[in-house]
Amino acid sequence: MIADRRYAYGDAALADRDWQAALDLFEQTLERVPLWPPAHLALAKAALALGEDIRARAALERVLALDPADHLGAALLLARIGGRPVAGAMPPAYVAALFDDYAPRFDSHLVGQLAYRAPDLLVAALDRHCPERTFGRVLDLGCGTGLMARALGARAGRILGVDLSPRMLALAVETGLYAGLEAGELVAFLEQQPLAEADLVIAADVFCYLPDLAPALAASARSLATSGLLAFTVQTHPGEGVMVGEDCRMHHAPGLVRTLAGAAGFTLLAEEEAVSRLDAGRPVPGALYLLAAA
């Protein structure tokens, strides 16, 4: 109980941006429960805020030693401070845990408070570039609670969805919009699909959880019929390659996306700047892509 109380006080101090008090309280917590990963992670966040990167790195490495599957996302924070490569910094266990926890308030918080509109942006792009086209077989990557299926409406025939979070999928089932739903990783899901049968593969704010887009693009190309489309959004940054942003999501340089799309055999139909959500009240830089399969 004392450890829980110290942790709760430390969490409140973090929220109040009293970094030193938070650090002290998490240290006190760990004196009583030295093997508790959340306390090590919280201490690392306080240390990072104080500019104590070495101390933060040690705490984050401790989290990974206690939880190699990294349910808490310690590798992401390590990647931000150069302690780990970006590749592998977004493990499936972390993403699944994140969205399982988020599921009950996902729609109301994302749409109501973060002004999320990636599905609407993607459908609007389809309306502009192929207004008369419908899609008989659709693969919805990272389908979540079903917001993308709702936005597609009558333009989609048979929709199959995949998501890492079972709790999100339970809400997607309730929509009645999916012909099938699968809990799992999206590249494995795509590789299990029949060759060259999908008319549309779509990913609304999903690729920001993938450090490396190449496997997803290649697997999408494999799944798509001739002239089938891949539509997706990404978060971007003005540099090169991929980086972990302050929001702990992956930000891909537009040039990298174009290069990887070409390597997977796609033709670029559209590349547009697109703000799909807010973070801390600020627009998150992003882009929308429509790619045609060879």
Image (tube, helix red, strand yellow):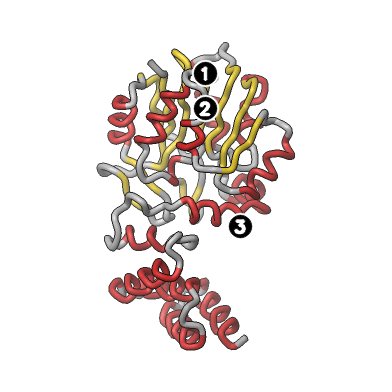
Q: Is residue 49 visible?
A: no
Residue 47 is tagged as none
Q: Which one is nearer the viewer's eye here, 84 or 272?
A: 84
Residue 198 in the image: above or below residue 286:
above
Q: Are marks 1 and 2 in contact (CB under 8 Å)?
A: yes
Q: Quadrant of residue 80?
A: bottom left
Q: Amino acid at mark 1?
A: Glu
The residue beneath circle 2 is 193
> Is 233 situated left or right of 152 in this image?
left
Q: Picture coordinates of residue 189 (x, y %)?
A: 51, 35
Q: Which one is nearer the viewer's eye here, 285 or 138?
A: 138
Question: Which residue is at a point 38% across and 72% down the rendered structure image?
Answer: 62
Q: Are marks 1 and 3 in contact (CB under 8 Å)?
A: no
Element at badge 3? helix
- Mark 2 against mark 3, which lies toward the viewer? 2
Q: Is residue 8 visible?
A: yes
Q: Picture coordinates of residue 151 (x, y %)?
A: 63, 30
Question: Which residue is at a point 32% across and 58% down the rendered structure image?
Answer: 79
Element at badge 2? loop
Q: Earlier in the sequence, mark 1 or mark 3?
A: 3
Q: Picture coordinates of residue 37 (x, y %)?
A: 47, 72
The residue beneath circle 1 is 197
User: Which part of the image, by quadrant, shows the N terminus?
Assistant: bottom right
User: Which part of the image, by quadrant, shows the C terminus?
Assistant: top left
Q: CA distance from mark 2 to mark 3?
A: 29 Å
Q: Quadrant of residue 120?
A: top right
Q: Earlier in the sequence, mark 2 or mark 3?
A: 3
Question: Which residue is at a point 41% across and 19% down the rendered structure image?
Answer: 292
Q: Amino acid at mark 3?
A: Asp
The residue beneath circle 3 is 101
